[in-house]
Image: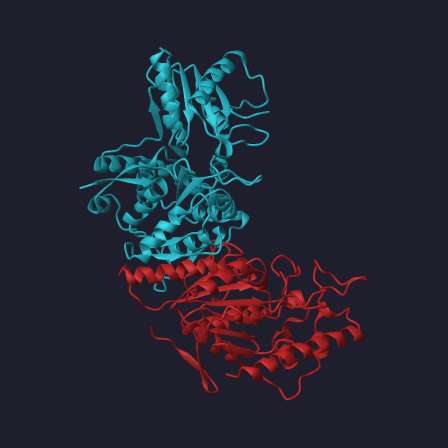
Amino acid sequence: MSRRVALEASHAAAEAAKMADVDVISAYPITPQTHIPERLAEMVADGELSAAYIPVESEHSAMSACLGAAAVGARTFTATAGQGLELMHEVVYIASSMRYPVVMTVCNRALSAPLSVWGDHSDAMAVRDTGWIQVFCQNNQEAFDLTLWAFRVGEDPNVLLPVMVHLDGFTLSHVTEPVILPEQSEVDRFLPRFQYPFALNPDKPMTHGAFGPPEIYSETKLAQEVAFRNSKEVVLQGWKEFGDIFGRYYHPVEEYKTENAETLLLTMGSFTETAKIVIDAKRDKGEAIGLISLRLWRPFPFEEFRRTVKGAKILIVFDRCISFGMGGPVFSEVRSALYDEEPRPKVVGIIGGLGGRDMSEEDFEYVIDRGKEIAEKGPEKMLETVGIRG
Amino acid sequence: METKAVRFGEKLVTTKEFLAEGHNFCTGCGEALAIRLAMKALGENVIMAMATGCDEVCTTPLPYTSWRVPWMHTLFENAASEISGVEAGLKILAKKGRMPDRDIKCVAMAGDGGTSDIGIQALSGAFERGHDFIYICLDNEAYMNTGIQRSSATPYGASTTTAPAGKFSIGQITRKKNMVAIAAAHDIPYVATACPSYRFDLMKKVRKGAELKGPAYVHILSPCPTGWRYSSNLTIEIGQLAVQTGIFPLYEIEGGRYRLNADPPKLKPVEEYLKLQGRYRHLTGEEIESIQEMVNEDYGKLKEKVAAFPM
């Protein structure tokens, strides 16, 4: 029997790693990720989980140790946030380029300076090009579900890529919600044992990480891109299998009241749930409005995204990050994804929720009203923002 | 697996080459020789993590490899953290019965830059955590792979491309970082210096470090004809002179106790070592004298440690 328990998202992610019977955890503490390694360390100390917990001296080493562990065929997990993700940046690229299926939770946090331990998506956006499969969670149940699913997809012999599960720092990481935990036998049915086909082994010596001269580097990168794009099939298959076993189905683009919607709001992560309340209110008033949320951020779900926004007149994109000199990164990406579509909605971008700034229902109302206004009249400012003074 | 060995005097040395022929090291490279010997000492039951540097670049241009043992490389500064993951992974997989427990030796190798500069944090962390591994520093006293830039292991007075000797500079103005003492300060079971000119000593130390449980550190002076600017046939002689002049003494620290492996009754003048190398060509007699004083001082301190904490 599955159990319904009260868990914060951090502990839900740790619980998923435990039920996945992870072999190696290598992590360095950083707010707001700390509850994840703390919980896992506790599980190892109490014998609830048979795993090696490596208390490394930095995030750079956290990911480096994950590479070593994955290279010998261990199921490997880590978690970080904000500056930690930045410090391990170069190693993040290595995990995907060398096809080590590490799973990492990122408790999304703003980037310094000024120092901020609070949430936004700047850390996530800074690693968008690293070749990791990346998904965003909206609530604590998803923190559990998507972490479990991440092992299933990343370790699939047809994928062998690392997976990053983004969950909002504090808003999710430190907030307690009811979470349904499955039976271990169901988890075991969903998640086969990790069989890394290229494990380093003295019986069959292999070289991992030879360098790429100009005659071959380009081909390795193209091969990586092909593998990355092909991974989407397993991403979808993984969600199908997950739904069939656990009863919760996930999609690359989640929709909420999108039927006959002339205006669509696009959000990512936990703020989606606040936005839903506003969508409800506006629908009640008869506004033809709906909400979409990008769950799968990489590989970018072009097909599903285009299909979902087809027919809408306005798409308002809410970003929790500034790409300096450019605007909202999600906004630029989705607008570019629609360029070849005919007809396509007018796409407008609004930035807010930076460094732990809350987004209230009123704020989302403003985003929608202002978004429609910009769509009609064109932008008046260099950068359209919500809830930011100045 | 059957391994053939040849006899050198009293010693048996495997004829197997784990660093395959056909690599791209410079002629006369002390590092290539050091690795070849170290690998013979380690045997085939190993997994290696290697930092970016000469040794990595000279052995693995895709699609080729010179390694006959399982080997990985990812970055410059993380060989020690990588091997931490390898070691932890092997241990837990054996504990969970997912693979046989066969005591695979975990080996990390890096140059002096990858060890005493950019990789020192990762190395310190791995020592402190007590992983069962051996870390071999191949010290050629500068960033040779990128073109002879100074590192913290470059000795005082040596000319490099980023600390060149000039009208107003002697070249390297700082003294060589004592990485061996730093390793020893972690109270790990085994720390040693070695040089490929003393091949049996080198192999013995590498084997010992690999066999002892816990972290081991072997710091190997690897003469570099390209960076030190000497004729490539002099590598062995220069390594010998480094030891015989006392500028690079061979010693071991086991359980905090010291042993000098070669303690000649009288050290040769350091000038004999310096004069063979282009990197010291600019030094005046006075400057050589001051280096001699530094060597005397350092050697004296080491002897005091050996006397105070004998093995």
Left or right of residue A66: residue B299: right
Across and down, in percent, residue B291 comes to 72, 74
Q: Colour of chain A?
A: cyan
Q: Colour of chain B?
A: red
Q: Nearer the viewer, residue B29 or A52?
A: A52
Visible residue check, residue A307: no
Q: Nearer the viewer, residue A46 or A68?
A: A46
Across and down, in percent, residue A371 comes to 48, 17
**Residue located at (29% from left, 54% from top):** A49
As drawn, which residue projects farthest toward the left?
A1
Residue A179 to residue A66: above or below: above
Across and down, in percent, residue A315 comes to 44, 19
Q: Nearer the viewer, residue A334 or A285?
A: A285
As drawn, which residue projects farthest toward the right?
B167
Residue A316 to residue A27: above or below: above
Q: Which of the image's four quarters has the C terminus of chain A? A: top right
Q: Quadrant of residue B129?
A: bottom left
Across and down, in percent, residue A230 comes to 37, 38
Visible residue check, residue B1: yes
Q: Quadrant of residue B47?
A: bottom left
Q: Which of the image's four quarters has the N terminus of chain A? A: top left
Q: Nearer the viewer, residue A157 or A239?
A: A239
Q: Quadrant of residue B132?
A: bottom left
**Residue located at (36% from left, 59% from top):** B89
Colouring scheme applied when the structure was drawn: by chain
Q: How many marks?
A: 0
Residue B106 to residue B76: above or below: below
